Image (cartoon, rainbow, N blue to C red):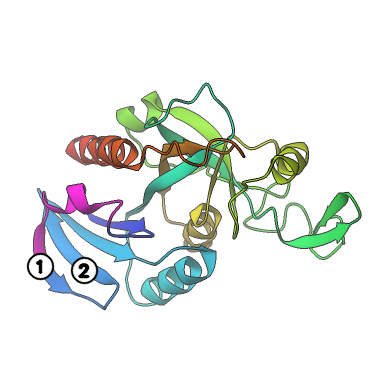
Amino acid sequence: MKILIVSATTLEIKPLLVNFKFVKRISAQCNSYTYKSMVIDVLTTGVSMVPTAYMMGRLFAREHYDAAFNVGIAGSFVRDIELGQVVHVTHDRFPEIGADQGEYFLSLIDLKLLEENYFPYKDGELINEMPIKSKTINSLRTARSITVNRVHTTNKSIEKIRRHCNPETESMEGAAFFYACFSEDIPCVQLRAVSNYVDQNDNDRWSIPLAIENLNKVVLQILHE
């Protein structure tokens, strides 16, 4: 079985890599490993959706995978997700693509530039209907997420995005990962560990080490299944 693990930074998957046996370097951003009977390619794209989309598109042009993981940290809009908790993102979207009209936001669908069910979208969202089969994944809380270029740090922007999308989490790469996997018909999963709450007054209370520790434990548990 050949698996792809995609992460924005090495920091987010460093504890995982010590369990793998290095095989070869595919590119400056991608290394190939083995773990048990699996071949695992690890792609470190860099932060944000543009490098994620480009790096994955370039890799998919020459490699085939049986499954793909997107792993990383995320901010949570809801307090009933604990700091450090790992969630399974099943819905994602690009909420910034469109136009502002005063206090209102017009999406590409509103602007008649995109049909709401134009592949791979469904009702304007990227919905993972082909997740990797796993008891561990099934045990995780599911979350609706957004993928952004700028994380939300002011009460005004937070309230606006809540009205527009009502997300539970946000990342800077997730929807780009989904778009690439859905386009190539690759079973995939997006796993996010909450490192912080999306709150204007909560910027100094981040739990990145805890989030990374829990995230890597979950991924390793899935690979053991």
Tell me if mark 1 has few (under 14), some (14-19) or many (20+) residues whose alpha carbon lies within 10 angstroms of its own: few
In the picture as drawn, the residue positioned furthest to the top comes out as 80
Residue 21 seen in the figure = yes
Residue 77 point in image, percent of width and height: 59, 34
Query: Which residue position holds label 1?
Result: 23
Residue type of the residue flagged with mark 1:
Val
Quarter of the figure with residue 112: bottom right
Give 96 or 59, whichever is nearer the viewer: 96
Query: Which residue position holds label 2?
Result: 31
Over which residues does the magenta segment extend? 11-22
Residue 193 point in image, percent of width and height: 39, 38
Left or right placement of residue 184 versus residue 122 in this view: left
Residue type of the residue flagged with mark 2:
Asn
Image quarter (top left, top right, bottom left or bottom right) of the C terminus: top left
Quarter of the figure with residue 133: top left
User: Residue at position x 33%, y 65% from top?
Assistant: 44
Q: CA distance from mark 1 to mark 2?
A: 8 Å
